């Protein structure tokens, strides 16, 4: 009964989304206020109805209602409650429902926060968002209905893929979808602006919070996914350049570019058409992501629904929205007059370079991802494009980006003198070179990657610090600290996010350059050395989990005479799903991780043990957290909050705005 | 079919990527073997190198690479040997020949075009700045004098 209610709510939401996609659009064109007013209640109600549908599905998973096909395939009565809930989106149908729930959520947020938007723009934005929702409602209802019943319900389910029964991966999809779908909001704003024929600083200010939020969620989502891969796959890889990973990485890069050029629109009213184009492309990439994950066109380790029919449907949605966006862009872009003028050396130009680097690197990944397909289709040449290619093709762009970033971040708007900025940055540069040189001298191998990575990391972190200090000006230390605390949050956000990028660079480079590995057969009682640490295998035992059986190793990690802790790598077998997984044991430190995973029992009674020394491993995710935190700080900047409630506090201009 | 392959890969998981018994006694040779296997694709598991993969076929390939190295082949010879048997598909770094040049050159070409367009755009911008901030015309100067002298 509850499932039928959910199903009914879903259909109702679909119908409502069609109405909300059409009526306000006509209203805005004809200036009929009554028709435009449909948009807000329409958007809010869609969210409510989709929420009902999603809750109904969650309920079915929680009570293990095995009359639903989806629950049977993806759940089991013995599964821990957490994974019963996360199992809702651990499959194709449920994840699409989550996707569309987030689409309508963003629509509702825009309706709630849109009080200060001009009525016609608001109506058009909400109508576009509803059109996106309608497309995905149709996709769910006609090709992947989560509420399908079983004629004969079985006694128990087939269990969720054990790889997904993990806290890291449980929350990876919702964040990723918040990111992907957040970009639908910028798309809606872009198309609405094209329909209006107007893009100005206010538009930039309305769009930026959504772009920021989308980028922030994508950062968290990608970080969680890579962290999961790191500890779950058994050998500590954190990035594979897999099509599905690339599918999330391309929108991230484009969103980062969009984030930066929206600043130019907001502050300087320039780069308008480029920003609009980027907003359209960003959403395009996030739908390409959905297509790649679900169509099975590109084979990948973790594509979870490979069904050509669904692929065609998604391709049609992608085609329609890109056609709509790009046609409108071609027709209306010349109308968008940029006002702000600036010199060749200025923050604007550096942001153009930033956009160029980010967009081209996303393009390179895109070409690499689809190349096997193109090559086979058109040249009859079956080949693979793997990590070595991506590393080689992608790294130069990041190197350039990292080198220019601290200088660009400090350049003033309009017209600048590079000399003045570089003088301030000399200490940071010298220190960064010293860090790189030190790393070069201390390392055992002769890799260039590690020192360069550390140099870039130090350069970015210290550059951000210098930037903050320069904003504070000269004063006593106490005064400086006080001024620093009073800086707008957006300034803090910028510095924190840029420093985070540096931290991630350093982590990635160090891990790729200086990782040490040990593969051996160990018997209980054996000790072995790894990068100056000693590991002792004490025992191996069998343990029974809630829905799995585990073989657990017990190891002691020590350095010299000092014992650092015990480690328990596991090998699990999920009998219902018939799948094994590995749970690596980690000894996490600031400068390194010690990573142990358990292999097979050997004929002579020993066990295969793989252990790794992973320098600066946590910096990769620490940096991602910093980047996301930076995004969050910017998002909570007073300007956006004030702009949102502007109607209520009209008396005084906010201080930060006046100060600029 | 693809799902089946994926399932087989995962079911095969208990046998690990590089096994202790595969490792060669000569560390230099082993290092070369590892480097080579990172660039060879596991043919049944999608998008994994034989160095990472758990599938039995990947193990066979790893052993094959080591066999060739022990027999005295150079790195290039080993790769040629594997490609001759399994096709270009096993290479994770696509060859930069023929139609693949498009793949290899797409990035640099795009960057050069982008830089060109960007520079042209910036030039135009700063020229319009020059016109925006041009000196006053004679007429305007006269008017300014007039206002100032009032």
Image: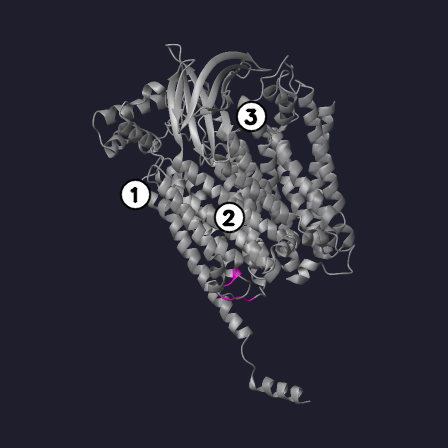
* Above or below, comparing residue A540 to residue B116 in the picture: above
For the residue pair A390 and A6, the one nearer the viewer reads as A390
Label 3 crowding class (10 Å Cα cut-off): few <14, some 14-19, many 20+? some
Residue A60 visible:
yes
Count of numbered badges drawn on the protein: 3
In the picture provided, is A245 more to the left or to the right than B60?
Answer: right
> Which chain is disc 1 placed on?
B
* Above or below, comparing residue A68 to residue A195 in the picture: above
Q: Secondary structure beneath disc 3?
A: helix
Tags 2 and 3 touching, CB below 8 Å: no
Q: Residue furthest front?
A: A561
For the residue pair A589 and A647, the one nearer the viewer reads as A589
Q: Give the labeled residue for mark 1.
A: B97
Disc 2 from disc 3: Cα separation: 35 Å
Identify which residue is drawn at 56% across, 29% down: A169
Q: Give the labeled residue for mark 3.
A: A164
Which of the 4 quarters of the picture holds residue B28? top left
Which of the 4 quarters of the picture holds residue A74? top right
Q: Give the labeled residue for mark 2.
A: A461
> Which chain is disc 3 placed on?
A
Disc 2 from disc 1: Cα separation: 41 Å
Query: Please, what is the dominant secondary structure of the magenta stretch?
Result: loop
Q: Which residues are magenta?
A: A341-348
Q: Which quadrant would the N terminus of chain A be assigned to in this image?
A: top right
Q: Of discs 2 and 1, which sits in the foreground?
A: 2
Q: Secondary structure beneath disc 1?
A: loop
Verify whether residue B72 appears in magenta: no
The image position of residue A465, as x and y in percent, is 54, 51
């Amino acid at each position: 009964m509850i499932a039928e209610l959910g199903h009914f709510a879903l259909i109702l939401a679909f119908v409502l989304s069609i109405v909300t996609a059409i009526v306000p659009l006509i209203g805005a064109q004809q200036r009929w206020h009554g028709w435009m007013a449909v948009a807000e209640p329409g958007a809010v109600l869609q969210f409510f109805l989709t929420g009902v549908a999603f809750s109904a599905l969650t309920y079915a998973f929680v009570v293990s209602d095995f009359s639903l096909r989806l629950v049977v395939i993806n759940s089991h009565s013995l599964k821990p409650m957490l994974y019963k809930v996360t199992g809702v989106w651990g499959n194709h149908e449920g994840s699409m429902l989550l996707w569309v729930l987030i689409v309508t959520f963003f629509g509702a947020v825009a309706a709630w926060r849109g009080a200060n938007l001009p009525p016609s723009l608001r109506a058009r934005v909400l109508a576009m968002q509803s059109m996106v929702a309608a497309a995905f409602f149709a996709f769910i209802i006609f090709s992947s209905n989560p509420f399908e019943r079983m004629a004969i319900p079985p006694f128990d389910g087939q269990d969720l893929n054990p790889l997904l029964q993990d806290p890291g991966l449980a929350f990876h999809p919702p964040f990723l979808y918040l990111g992907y779908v957040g970009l639908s909001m910028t798309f809606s704003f872009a198309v609405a602006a094209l329909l209006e024929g107007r893009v100005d600083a206010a538009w930039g200010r309305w769009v930026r919070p959504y772009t920021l939020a989308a980028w922030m969620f994508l950062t968290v989502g990608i970080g969680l996914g890579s962290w999961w891969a790191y500890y779950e796959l058994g050998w500590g890889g954190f990035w594979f350049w897999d099509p599905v990973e690339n599918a999330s990485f391309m929108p991230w890069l484009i969103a980062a570019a969009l984030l930066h050029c929206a600043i130019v629109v907001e502050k300087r009213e320039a780069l308008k058409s480029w920003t609009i184009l980027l907003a359209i492309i960003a959403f395009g990439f996030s739908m390409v992501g959905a297509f790649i994950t679900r169509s099975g066109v590109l084979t990948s380790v973790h594509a979870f629904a490979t069904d050509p029919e669904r692929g065609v449907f998604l391709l049609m949605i992608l085609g329609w929205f890109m056609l709509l966006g790009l046609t409108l862009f071609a027709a209306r872009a010349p109308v968008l007059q940029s006002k702000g003028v600036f010199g060749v050396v200025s923050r604007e130009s550096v942001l153009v370079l930033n956009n160029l680097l980010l967009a081209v690197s996303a393009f390179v990944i895109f070409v690499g991802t689809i190349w096997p397909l193109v090559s086979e289709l058109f040249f009859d040449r079956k080949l693979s494009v793997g990590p070595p290619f991506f590393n080689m093709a992608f790294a130069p762009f990041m190197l350039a980006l990292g080198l220019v970033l601290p200088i660009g971040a400090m350049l003033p708007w309009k017209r600048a003198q590079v000399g003045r900025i570089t003088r301030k940055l000399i200490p940071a540069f010298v220190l960064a070179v010293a860090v790189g040189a030190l790393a070069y001298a201390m390392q055992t191998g002769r890799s260039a990657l590690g020192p360069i990575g550390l140099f870039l990391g130090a350069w970015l972190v210290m550059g951000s610090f210098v930037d903050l200090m320069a904003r504070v000006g000269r004063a006593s230390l106490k005064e400086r600290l006080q001024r620093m605390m009073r800086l707008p949050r957006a300034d803090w956000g910028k510095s924190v996010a840029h420093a985070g990028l540096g931290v991630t660079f350093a982590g990635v480079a160090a891990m790729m350059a200086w990782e040490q590995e040990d593969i051996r057969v160990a018997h209980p009682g054996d000790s072995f050395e790894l990068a100056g640490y000693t590991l002792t295998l004490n025992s191996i035992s069998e343990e029974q989990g809630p829905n799995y059986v585990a073989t657990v190793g017990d190891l002691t990690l020590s350095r010299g005479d000092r014992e650092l802790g015990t480690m328990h790598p596991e090998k699990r077998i999920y009998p219902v799903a018939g799948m094994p997984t590995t749970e690596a044991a980690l000894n996490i430190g600031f400068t390194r991780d010690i990573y142990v995973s358990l292999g097979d029992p050997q004929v002579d009674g020993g066990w295969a043990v793989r252990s790794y020394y992973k320098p600066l491993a946590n910096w990769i995710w620490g940096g991602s957290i910093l980047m996301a935190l930076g995004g969050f700080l910017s998002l909570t900047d007073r300007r956006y909050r004030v702009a949102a409630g502007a109607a209520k506090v009209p008396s005084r201009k906010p201080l930060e705005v006046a100060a600029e | 079919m693809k799902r089946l392959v994926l399932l087989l890969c995962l079911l095969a998981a208990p046998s690990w990527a590089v096994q202790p018994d595969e490792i060669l006694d000569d560390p230099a040779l082993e290092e070369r073997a590892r480097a080579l296997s990172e660039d060879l694709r596991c043919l049944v598991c999608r998008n994994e190198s034989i160095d990472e993969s758990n599938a039995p076929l990947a193990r066979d390939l790893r052993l094959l690479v080591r066999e060739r190295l022990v027999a005295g082949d150079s790195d290039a010879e080993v790769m040629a040997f594997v490609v001759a048997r399994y096709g270009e598909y096993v290479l994770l770094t696509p060859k930069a020949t023929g139609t693949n040049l498009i793949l290899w050159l797409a990035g640099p070409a795009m960057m050069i075009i982008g830089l060109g367009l960007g520079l042209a755009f910036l030039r135009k911008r700063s020229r319009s700045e020059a016109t925006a901030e041009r000196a006053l015309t004679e007429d305007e100067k006269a008017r300014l004098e007039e206002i100032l002298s009032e």
